[in-house]
Amino acid sequence: MSNAADIAIYDTTLRDGAQREGMALSCADKLRIAQQLDALGIAFIEGGWPASNPKDAELFRRARDVPWRSATLAAFGATRRAGVPAGEDSGLTALLDAGAPVCTLFGKTSLRHVRDVLRTSPDENLAMIEDSVHWLVARGRRVIYDAEHFFDGARDDEAYAHATLRAAARGGAETIVLCDTNGGTLPWEIAQRVHAAALAVPAPIGIHAHDDTGCAVAATLAAVRAGAVHVQGTLNGYGERCGNANLTTIIPALELKLGARCVRPGALLELGRVARLVAETANLGFDEHTPYVGRSAFAHKGGVHVAAQRRSPGAYEHIDPALVGNRTRVVVSELAGRANVRAIADAHALGASDDAHARVLARIKEREADGFAFEAAEASVALMVRRAAPGYAPPFELLDYHVMTGKRAGGEPYADATVKVRIGEELVHTAAEGNGPVSALDRALCKALARFAIDVELLDYKVRIVDGRAGTAAITRVLVDVGDGVERWSTVGAAPSIVEASLCALVDAIEHGIALARTREQQRRTDEGHDRLAAR
Amino acid sequence: MSNAADIAIYDTTLRDGAQREGMALSCADKLRIAQQLDALGIAFIEGGWPASNPKDAELFRRARDVPWRSATLAAFGATRRAGVPAGEDSGLTALLDAGAPVCTLFGKTSLRHVRDVLRTSPDENLAMIEDSVHWLVARGRRVIYDAEHFFDGARDDEAYAHATLRAAARGGAETIVLCDTNGGTLPWEIAQRVHAAALAVPAPIGIHAHDDTGCAVAATLAAVRAGAVHVQGTLNGYGERCGNANLTTIIPALELKLGARCVRPGALLELGRVARLVAETANLGFDEHTPYVGRSAFAHKGGVHVAAQRRSPGAYEHIDPALVGNRTRVVVSELAGRANVRAIADAHALGASDDAHARVLARIKEREADGFAFEAAEASVALMVRRAAPGYAPPFELLDYHVMTGKRAGGEPYADATVKVRIGEELVHTAAEGNGPVSALDRALCKALARFAIDVELLDYKVRIVDGRAGTAAITRVLVDVGDGVERWSTVGAAPSIVEASLCALVDAIEHGIALARTREQQRRTDEGHDRLAAR
């Protein structure tokens, strides 16, 4: 087991992570992510491969003006080409020119790759490794050496694999990283080979795992137990093929399970936020089932588990969710009982009888059969509880809507919407235009409801086809996230038409917003009343 | 290491998997999935918990009429309540009544749970386990015993934990399954405790892992190496919180990496199809980065990897993808070079010059900046290659479109669309209605293009908001999957308006379909010509 204070985390989200299919990051995206990683206290941030991507060269230029708190920026590159002196290798000079304090060089460990891919001799490969590391070290760079295909190479010829590591150490590499480049090595073999390499090479050892067997996290933790003190990975496990080792999962394990310090104190509480920000920046959905930080990571749905958690908090949780800024949740679904609806009613300070809760539950089941899904739309459930209360009058009612959208040859697309809304005894009939049918309706609705003086902003909008096999005639489910600057909430709508489904979710979102604003207003008046009483 | 031929796979997708947040399966869904599992040669299928869910009782009734090939159905339930004789426990009688040949009983291993959740004595818990197993065995059932919280319990008091296992063995359980119910135990501890339990208990040992540390697959494989011969898990790793151990990943590892036989010969080739079918049935997106079976599992994006794979096939692959019915892919993206575009042109038998490929690449980069994403829309790329060829004339051109959609109080929603299309010299102007704006447009377009006599059916339709933060005014990206009964292809569209984006993808899908039909027709004529020549 390594010393508790010195596992260096090396993040390669911006370089190896960006190899993920479906992922593209601009230079501004990369800088934004790098600054978040720096704030977490990640030791090394690999910015990119300047010789292979002009965007990455720009990143290193712009990074010089960023006031990094503690992270060290690393630039990635390959050892020199066969038969070319280091000083004449354009890749190495580009790496030096990037100006990052750390250069991470990858080289070949496997004789198969030396022969078939590099097409050079085993001895020249050793010289390429030593020369390249030495050339950069002689020019004032710290060098981390990534031994590509280490585990496959060592399986074929361990003596040669270790010789490549020693070549890097002779060149002056400060850390030697063993890469399971193809991701096929299982954790017990990783542990055994890390242990053997640590004995064979006079340098600190690192681990770089890929998730092709679904074991990258376990392999990384096994390597740390076997002596690795440097861990490479990516946030959310992004990376080529099945992805890299997921730092979002590894960091809490190192800190909470292995007792190793690897990030700034308090950083665990921020990890989920940063992981989501990276997903959002990359335009990828965040997997809410992610260990430790996912919204579902401590969510209980089964009635037995919910009941046991009530008797013994933590009975079905492996750690206290608060340690990673998460919380225990009870999920509302068709499997749920009245207790789950009551939990939501309580969370929103809504009373209502057991009978009302039973009616809400029946309504939930009915609507779920129609394609709704309430698990991510707590505000729609809270609204159903409100509506079930005797005497509840909705603040407004949408009567009619019409949208016209289209494009004439050579022209710009247009979208116009009209809405007719009843507010108390009055009818409001108005119109607005937008970029598409949904934004036109959203604007028309906000215009019609201007008198409520609430400022509900649409923050996110997600569309799912519930039954993909029936194509556009299937049910469309829309989830809407909105906020009013004070709170943020989510609602759901479902219908065969995307416009109808969107409106259904928007109406819920606005009605819930009006209720929230009223509750806050009442609270303010009550507080003022208390203040007046206290001032007497 | 266990005997290669006897790892029994126990699938609990239908019971523990359905605890996943966002997952709901009807009785028909469950039967459909169970039959697919049976075809794979999965040894045990856990159908549900008859005492807790009336849907599950129905499943067991209907399952009696299904001609199972080789799978054994299991019903799940708890040991009898404290102080109640087994024969008077409603849960046990419901379990017996389900009529499944195997009953899987879970009981408490951890003294904390015995005290705080069951609120009974350690001795009564042992009696509850032995009695309940024995009562079912005496009535002709095979019993598998799930030791809930085994690893947490053994960490607190190993002697008592082992005593609970021995109680189950005395009752007649045929297999004792060690459950890491809270999912917090790391693989090396799993291995050590499985080994100790196997020595302490005279019965075959199984493993049931959860993914709360992202190590469920590794923990399961470690347990098998330590002597477990029975593996519980779910397809796609569905399950409560972070999910259960993912059988989609474990089965290939057992067969290909550990040399253990656990499914029918040839089943590995079907695994990806079944995993997607389960996702589709559950209305959940399939993770295409899943090890072994994901579309991205052997996809290469980085230029260096693509080049090395060409020099040495398999250089960046841990197994031959064909073993799991998968294939090597090259991904087109803004990082891609001309070689990637050429690979797609070749796959579609499109010639075109290097210069044309360079123009297509430039166009791809331009459109990706506008919000398009071509990685999952190969047909849109193929179409760009066609359009870049000199003399290509599109079979039709969409000039104008208009959609009206809305609802009047008390009425049904309506959606009418008109399209004006140029086909050669002729203008076709027509209209159709649909469930929503997109289906109305799809129908109007098909009507206008009826003369091409192609039958393009919309199979799936996916919508993404590219920048969620700007709400409905953000770019909407639509991916369309279509088929014509012979082939299946995907296209992409992106625009601020969902209607505009959908149309863009639909037009590509139809234009590609017309090209495909023409190519097939030419091929047919050529073949006929050859046949005529051969017949002379």
Image (spheres, coloured by chain):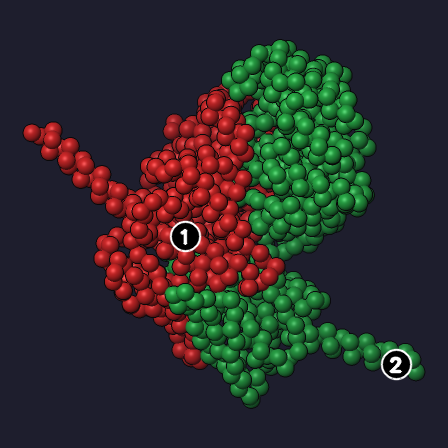
Chain colours: A red, B green
Are circles 1 and 2 on residues that touch, CB within 8 Å? no
Viewer-closest of B38 and B73: B73
Quadrant for the C terminus of chain A, please: top left
Q: Residue furthest bottom?
A: B425
Neighbour tally class for label 2: few under 14, some 14-19, many 20 plus, Cα within 10 Å: few
Q: Evaluate whether residue A110 shows in this view.
A: no
User: How far apart are labels 1 and 2 at the CA level?
Assistant: 64 Å
Residue with the mark numbered 2:
B533
Q: Secondary structure at mark 1?
A: strand
Quadrant for the N terminus of chain A, please: top right
Residue with the mark numbered 1:
A480
* x and y, in percent, of residue A393 in the image: 31, 51
The quarter of the picture where residue B424 lies is: bottom right
Q: Are marks 1 and 2 on the same chain?
A: no
Residue at 37% across, 35% down: A346
* x and y, in percent, of residue A499 in the image: 44, 63
Query: Subunit of mark 2?
Result: B
The quarter of the picture where residue A219 lies is: top right
Kindly identify the amino acid type of the residue bearing the numbered disc 1.
Val
Classify residue B258 as left or right of residue A482.
right
Q: Evaluate whether residue A283 shows in this view.
A: yes
Kindly identify the amino acid type of the residue bearing the numbered disc 2.
Leu
Residue at 79% across, 78% down: B526
